Image: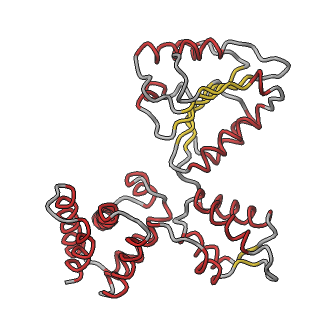
Amino acid sequence: MKFEDLENDLNKQIRPAYLINGGESYLTTLALKTIEKRLNISLNEFNKVYFSDEFSGNMKDIVASCNVLPIMDSFRLIVIYDYMGKKSDSEKNAFLNYLKNPCASTCIVFFSTNKSEFFSSFEGKVENVECDKVSIQFLRNWVIGKLKGKGLDIDNDVLNKLFDYCNYSITKLNTEIEKLASIKVGASSKTITNEDVESYITKDIEYVIFDLSNAISNKDKDKAFMLTNAMLKNKEQPLSIVSLITNHFRRLFFISRSNFNDFELAEYLNIKEFAIKKYREQLRFFTQKELKKIFDLCVEIEFKLKSGMMEAKNAVSFLISSILS
């Protein structure tokens, strides 16, 4: 189940177990809050139980807690954070056996930031809430609603720029909107402008890599080095920068050769669907032969960096110079 479908699904039924996971930390937190709100628990100290990383017991202890009836509420909520390191068959079987006859008044939520392999056997038995991607329409409505709640508005073109700068990440958008709201507190105009976005929004590193790719396609050496130097000044590690550039051109090369549609590409490459359109726009500036040459060069430099054959301080400038030569 996608995050966007969670609220409607909760209105139809409250499932015995959920697994919340995904790369958008804002969404994972919001998903848990959405479930908590629907359960409408008033006596938190009795009917909400949280098992954190410090929990030293096992799944049998958790199952025992699940079978406790709520006090003066309709539901009892059990939240288990991550659950790394507890991957034995006995642990799994204890929970799987519980799910065969779950307590009707208990809702158990696994909150996993990295979707441990522990949960692979739970497929079809717990409701997986995916918090990686949302639709562009959901994102638009959410941003406009959040800005409106702070007495702000935004034009469509400026909104698109904000999306680009934040790489369509709702987690980053949430942070940057809070920043814009504080800046606009004493301003006479409550409309977010292009100048506001350009002046105050910190560009997502993926957006900077798109900018760098554009500079490379235009043979704009000055801009390419300006962007890489800015990343280094912002404490980005050389290996991380090289890996990001490598991954960018890997995706470009794959998309140039693929017959997949945008949705299939997004799923295969594990990126947001709107990003595929940006990649396709960049394909106009490179031939497949050029992309293969750049990608091979990136892989070579990345290998030399990781193996200690090249000094980190020289790697990024050498890579950019080699691509542009």
Q: Percent position (x, y) of residue 125?
A: 54, 24
Q: Percent position (x, y) of residue 66?
A: 65, 16
Quarter where residue 52 is shown: top right
Q: Residue at x 60, y 44 (%)?
A: 28
Above or below 231: residue 271: above
Q: Quadrant of the C terminus?
A: bottom left
Relative to the observer, which residue lies in front, 320 or 219?
320
Q: Is residue 90 visible?
A: yes
Above or below 26: residue 125: above
Q: Residue at x 34, y 88 (%)?
A: 222
The mark tally for this picture is: 0
Relative to the observer, which residue lies in front, 88 or 156?
88
Quarter where residue 318 is shown: bottom left
Would residue 57 be found to the left or right of residue 265 on screen?
right
Q: Quadrant of the N terminus?
A: top right
Above or below 7: residue 12: above
Q: Residue at x 43, y 72 (%)?
A: 208
Relative to the observer, which residue lies in front, 271 or 195?
195
Q: Percent position (x, y) of residue 207?
A: 46, 70
Q: Percent position (x, y) of residue 30?
A: 66, 45
The way the protein has been coloured in the rendering is secondary structure
Q: Is residue 258 visible?
A: no
Relative to the observer, which residue lies in front, 173 or 277?
173
Above or below 300: residue 63: above
